[in-house]
Image: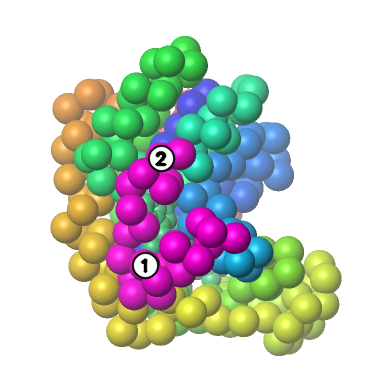
Amino acid sequence: MHVVFIGAPGVGKGTQAQRLREQRGWTVIATGDLLREAMALGNPLGVQAKQYIERGELVPDQLVNDLVEERLQAVEGSFILDGYPRNVMQAEQLNGVLQKHRKPLDKVIKFDLPEEVLIRRLSGRRLCPQCGAVYHIESNPSRLGEQCENCEAALVTRQDDSPETVQRRLQVYAEQTRPLIEYYEARGLLIRVPAEGTPDEVYARLLQALGK
Ligand code: AP5
């Protein structure tokens, strides 16, 4: 199955994608993670992406389009695109790539959550800079406190989770990504999944939406 995840910052896309990877063996292509990896390596893509991510802006389309096409070429079996496409230009580009590689989209999952809950999720998020594990100080704390349960590295707050940058990311989402809802609705691909409740509850709804 070939699936796109759309939803505002902090809605839980990464958390749910991770579950499908662990429990069903699906490949996850998450542009945010790929860009953060490039930033940590300090390679040319990372250096270019950093200035946009830190301001809460989208990274230029060409940079992410190339990154995704490279990954899609290699993927076998079911995949999730988490956080891509994020505007209509990227969606058009994705159509072309998927047609070329004969991997048509089956479903687009749109996660829904009120803004005050999004902000609570983002302000409490903690990230392991070493293995990428994601925690939340209230809903999913590390058993080791400020250290990662997997690799014991000190947890950090994502630089773009500061209150000012979160406001800008929400604005960018409303202006540039929300139009994709109509775009995919018109193509009969969009399914809405309420993202309230525990990760387990959201996962159960997600599996139902995917017909699993
Ligand atoms: P990206 O990393 O994709 O950020 P995002 O879309 O803003 O989404 P987040 O990662 O913030 O949230 P999420 O929905 O994955 O939530 P999570 O599961 O972590 O992108 C970052 C930046 O990269 C962008 O701003 C842009 O600059 C650039 N970029 C990326 N893709 C791009 C593209 N295609 N084009 C251009 N630029 C691009 O959950 C959040 C927190 O809530 C966690 O702490 C988690 O533990 C907790 N949580 C999750 N589910 C629940 C639950 N059910 N109950 C309670 N807590 C929960």
Q: Nearer the viewer, residue 96 or 17?
A: 96
Q: Residues within 10 Å of mark 2 (few under 14, many from 20)?
A: some
Residue in the picture at 17% in, 38% down: 182
Image coordinates of residue 4 in percent, x first then y, are: 42, 37
As measured in the structure, the alpha-carbon distance from the residue carrying label 2 to the one carrying label 1 is 16 Å
Give yes or no for residue 121 being in the magenta stretch: no
**Which contiguous range is marked in magenta?**
43-66
Tag 2 residue: 65
Give yes or no for residue 48 being in the magenta stretch: yes
* Ligand 1 image position (quadrant): bottom left
Q: Is residue 192 left or right of residue 77?
A: left
Image coordinates of residue 137 in percent, x first then y, are: 58, 82
- Considering only order in the chain, which callout, 1 or 2, is on the residue closer to the N terminus? 1
| Residue type pointed to by label 1 | Tyr
Mark 2 Cβ and ligand 1 under 8 Å apart: no
Residue in the picture at 25% in, 51% down: 177
Residue in the picture at 43% in, 15% down: 100
Mark 1 Cβ and ligand 1 under 8 Å apart: yes
Image coordinates of residue 105 in percent, x first then y, are: 40, 24
Tag 1 residue: 52
